[in-house]
Amino acid sequence: MKLGNNIRRCRFDMDEMSQEKLAHAVGVTRQTIFSIEKGKFVPSTLLALKIARIFNKKVDDIFYIIDD
């Protein structure tokens, strides 16, 4: 199983928020956001909750499981 996400879509829906701006808002680097979006890094529960809060969504609206 892998973790998929809708972060790119959420950023686009928020006036095309940059990865840098999102990273700053949740206290990580732009590279971390890039890695999460590409599915190369699984965020901690705390980070997932912070990201969801920024977009005013539930965690499972942003992150989902991909069955292999």
Image: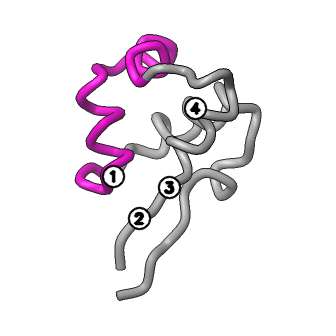
Q: Main secondary structure of the magenta part?
A: helix
CB under 8 Å between callouts 1 and 4?
Answer: no
Q: What is the distance, in whole Å, between disc 3 and disc 4 at their CAs? A: 12 Å
**Where is the N terminus found, in terms of image quarters?**
bottom left
Disc number at residue 11?
Answer: 4
Q: What is the distance, in whole Å, between disc 4 and disc 2 at their CAs? A: 18 Å
Q: Earlier in the sequence, mark 1 or mark 4?
A: 4
Disc number at residue 42?
Answer: 1
Is residue 26 rendered to the left or right of residue 16?
Answer: left
What kind of residue is marked 1? Val
Whole-percent x and y of residue 66?
45, 77
Q: Earlier in the sequence, mark 3 or mark 4?
A: 3
Q: Is residue 66 above or below residue 68?
A: above
Q: Secondary structure at mark 3?
A: strand
Q: What is the distance, in whole Å, between disc 2 and disc 3 at their CAs? A: 7 Å
Mark nearest the camera among 3 and 4 is 4
Residue carrying label 2: 3
